[in-house]
Image: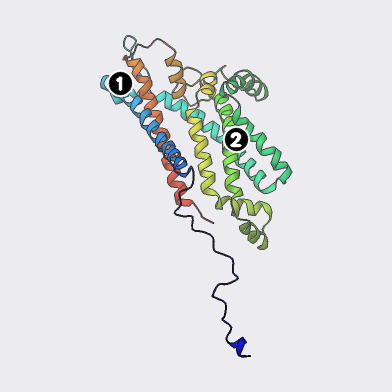
Amino acid sequence: MAQNATTASPPPGAGLPASPPDLSRRPRPGEQVIKAVLVLSAGASILITFGIIAAVIEPALHFFEEVPFGQFFATEDIGSREYRPAVLPLLVGTALTTVIALALAVPLGLGAAMYLSEYASPRARKWLKPTVELLAGVPSVVYGFFALFFVTPVVLQGWFNLEVNFTNAWAAGIVLGVMIIPTVASLSEDALSAVPMALRQGSYAMGANRMQTTLRVVLPAALSGVAAAIVLGLSRAVGETMIVTMAGGAVKNMSVDPSEPHMTMTAFIAITAQGENPVGSVSYNMLFAVGLLLFIITFIINAISIAFVRRFRQAY
């Protein structure tokens, strides 16, 4: 009994697994290299953006030294002897084709996203989502030929019996909308799928059906992501070149009739850049002025989108 009483007790912590070694201060192989590559990548994107601005703004400033703002935003080219540019018809053509594209892409894209997220089985979703995203890989020049030789003669003139020109805003806007459907559908589906299942289960527990849950619970919860998808599609529609150049026409038009040809800002840049424009001339510098205006419009759209997303973002 005395021997047992005098036996030393085990030290504290004996028999417990050893704590893992502290590796927070040890340099990991390649960590600094990876960090440097990431920093360089982020810095390169910023430098490229400023490089684009610098390349565009200098000729644009030379343009505005010769052409006042009022003449630049005129409704038509005035005078036959002197080249007097007008950008307002280009803005009308850009807005018209973009509105048509969004009117087609937003309902179809959101509908596809809601079906893939809320209704499709895992097997169907596995095949349908890559199929929708496959449209994003089609070259824009193929879309342009599709608009010229199918949408205009077969769909507009044949099925709907519309009197449209060979090049028109209807065909350009419709095919432009088809092109941005994958962008709206894929990003919106990701936003809808990120909504926690608990919100859906709570809605079902309150007696709501699947459609009510999708429209009144899931969609509002993913509103910021859906808005970002729509704005990204909008930005791509504004900046698209080949479709509007081939199918929209090369006429500066102030009319809002989609059956007529309309030249957009990107189409103007593409068409004018192919002609004979001496470096330093007014017509040459106008290319950069229109490009700068297009950059400003896109920047404003993205800034509004970022503010909207931050305002309505919900963290789960």
Mark nearer the N terminus (1 vs 2) = 1
Q: Residue at x 35, y 15 (%)?
A: 283
Whether tag 1 and tag 2 are in contact, CB under 8 A, the answer is no
Quarter holding the N terminus is bottom right
Report the coloring of the rendering. rainbow
In the figure, residue 306 lies in which quadrant? top left
- In the rendered image, the quadrant that contains the C terminus is bottom right
Q: In the image shown, does 131 or 100 lie closer to the viewer? A: 131
Q: Left of 240 or right of it: where is 294?
A: left
Q: Is residue 25 above or below residue 34?
A: below
Q: How many neighbours does mark 2 have within 10 angstroms: few (below 14), some (14-19), or many (20 or more)?
A: many
Viewer-side residue, 177 vs 5 = 5
**Which structural element holds mark 1?**
helix
Viewer-closest of 306 and 64: 306
Question: Cα distance, mark 1 to mark 2?
Answer: 38 Å
Q: Which mark is residue 182?
A: 2
Where residue 284 appears, as percent x and y from the top left, is: 36, 16
Q: Secondary structure at mark 2?
A: helix
Q: Looking at the picture, how far across and down is residue 165, in whole percent? A: 56, 17
Residue that mark 1 sits on:
63
Please tell me which residue is depicted at 45% across the width and 47% down the height of the picture.
Answer: 308
Given the image, on which type of amino acid does mark 1 rest?
Phe
Judge from the rendering whether residue 315 lies leftward or rightward of residue 45; answer left or right: right
